[in-house]
């Protein structure tokens, strides 16, 4: 609607203009119900904040935004390397948006199509429904998702699809093949309710694959801890204190696997002779550590996301597609 103002939005949503402003600028200060009502009014009225013209006028270079809840994880950093490398010879600079709350997630996905602060958007491991997809398409914000196969994938937005469950099954089959029958698992206690990443991605498929061979993985042999080597080290010690300690531990990330190896060394356990340790991701340090792990195509997924996004921005868009990433067993010295 032409010449729509913030007053029109406030009237349609039945809230004050202050509330509309807070939804746009400080979304965590507004209840989810009110925020949804205001965003619906913005969509219905095609409201565009006045500062958009100024933002567009000031832009001398295009911008690609990356939206993620995993800003500090090593796997994100490796994926980011792929994104950054693919943008080196492009006319775009990189902007990273770290999502730390539900309100912040919703605000970014609602505001970025309206504000034109970025020309394209890569969304990593965040829930994405058709309402959000419609908003991005309506405002012509080129978008590519990097999502899990277990997530509800929008058919109208191109996606890079990773299947961590397949990699976890691969890890279980490998360790079973090495003769192990008593397993432990060290993974992340994910409190990010606004992320699609959870225990079902790795732990559940790992456990189910063991069960198919008649090998249980009791809860007492599962240690879910905050992300990081030190927490993983402590979690591994708890498993190794069990009356019948595991002979193999699968970690949900290479970072955590390194923490498990540290715990084994502190106890004088030979790796892999007395304790096999296996990681996930194949980050750069894994090769130097001789870590047996599951490689996922982190850099490649970032590079491919940029390629798909730039194709949309260059006026040569492809039909929406879902591109699966493959996983590879990297057999090294720890299992």
Image (cartoon, rainbow, N blue to C red):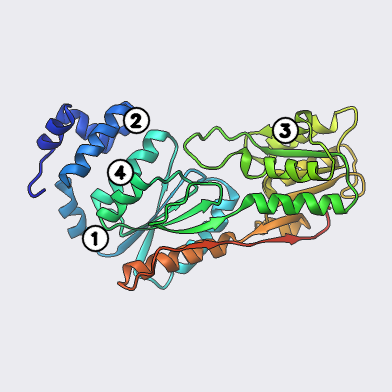
Disc sitting over residue 110 in the figure: 4
For mark 1, what is the residue? Answer: 59
User: Residue 204, position in %: x, y?
Assistant: 68, 40
Please indicate whether residue 213 sits to the left or right of residue 41 in the image: right
Number of residues whose C-alpha sits closer than 10 Å to that of mark 1, classed few (under 14), some (14–19) or many (20 or more):
few
Mark 3 or 2 closer to N-term? Answer: 2
Disc sitting over residue 223 in the figure: 3
Number of residues whose C-alpha sits closer than 10 Å to that of mark 3, classed few (under 14), some (14–19) or many (20 or more):
many
Q: Check contact, mark 4 vs mark 3: CB within 8 A.
A: no
User: Residue 12, position in %: x, y?
Assistant: 14, 33
For mark 2, what is the residue? Answer: 28
The residues bearing labels 1 and 4 have C-alpha atoms spaced at a distance of: 21 Å
Q: Quadrant of residue 170 in the image?
A: bottom right
Please indicate whether residue 181 sits to the left or right of residue 19 in the image: right
The residues bearing labels 4 and 3 have C-alpha atoms spaced at a distance of: 37 Å
Mark 4 or 2 closer to N-term? Answer: 2
Mark 1 or 4 closer to N-term? Answer: 1
Q: Check contact, mark 1 vs mark 2: CB within 8 A.
A: no
User: Residue 286, position in %: x, y?
Assistant: 71, 56
Asked whether residue 243 is in view, the answer is yes
Mark 1 or 2 closer to N-term? Answer: 2
- Callout 1: helix, strand or loop? loop
- Callout 3: helix, strand or loop? strand
The residues bearing labels 4 and 2 have C-alpha atoms spaced at a distance of: 13 Å
Residue nearest the viewer, comparing 38 with 281: 38
Please indicate whether residue 79 sits to the left or right of residue 264 in the image: left
Q: Check contact, mark 1 vs mark 4: CB within 8 A.
A: no
């Amino acid at each position: 609607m032409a010449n729509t103002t913030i007053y029109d939005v406030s009237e349609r949503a039945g809230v004050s203009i202050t509330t509309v402003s807070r939804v746009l600028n400080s979304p965590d200060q507004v209840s989810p119900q009110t925020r949804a009502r205001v965003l619906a009014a913005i969509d219905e009225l095609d409201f565009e904040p006045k500062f958009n013209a100024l933002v567009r006028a000031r832009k001398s270079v295009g911008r690609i935004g990356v939206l993620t809840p995993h800003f500090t994880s090593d796997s994100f950093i490796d994926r980011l390397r792929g994104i950054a490398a693919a943008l080196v010879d492009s006319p775009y600079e990189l902007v990273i948006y770290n999502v730390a709350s539900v309100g912040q997630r919703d605000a970014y996905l609602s505001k970025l199509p309206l504000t034109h602060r970025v020309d394209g958007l890569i969304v990593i491991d965040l829930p994405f429904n058709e309402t959000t997809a419609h908003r991005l398409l309506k405002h012509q914000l080129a978008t590519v998702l990097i999502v899990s196969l277990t997530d509800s994938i929008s058919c109208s937005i191109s996606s890079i699809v990773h299947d961590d469950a397949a990699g976890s099954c691969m890890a279980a089959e490998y360790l079973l093949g090495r003769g192990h029958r008593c397993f432990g698992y060290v993974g992340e206690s994910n409190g990010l309710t606004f992320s699609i990443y959870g225990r079902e991605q790795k732990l559940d498929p790992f456990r189910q694959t063991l069960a198919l061979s008649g090998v249980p993985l009791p809860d007492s042999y599962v240690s879910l801890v905050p992300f990081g080597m030190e927490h993983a080290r402590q979690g591994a010690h708890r498993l190794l204190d069990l009356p019948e300690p595991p002979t193999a531990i699968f970690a949900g990330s290479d970072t955590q696997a390194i923490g498990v190896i540290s715990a084994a060394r502190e106890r004088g356990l030979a790796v892999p002779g007395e304790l096999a340790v296996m990681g996930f991701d194949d980050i750069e340090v894994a090769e130097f550590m001789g870590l047996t792990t599951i490689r996922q195509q982190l850099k490649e997924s970032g590079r491919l996301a940029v390629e798909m996004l730039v194709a949309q921005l260059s006026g040569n868009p492809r039909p929406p597609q879902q591109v699966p990433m493959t996983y590879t067993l990297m057999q090294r010295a720890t299992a």
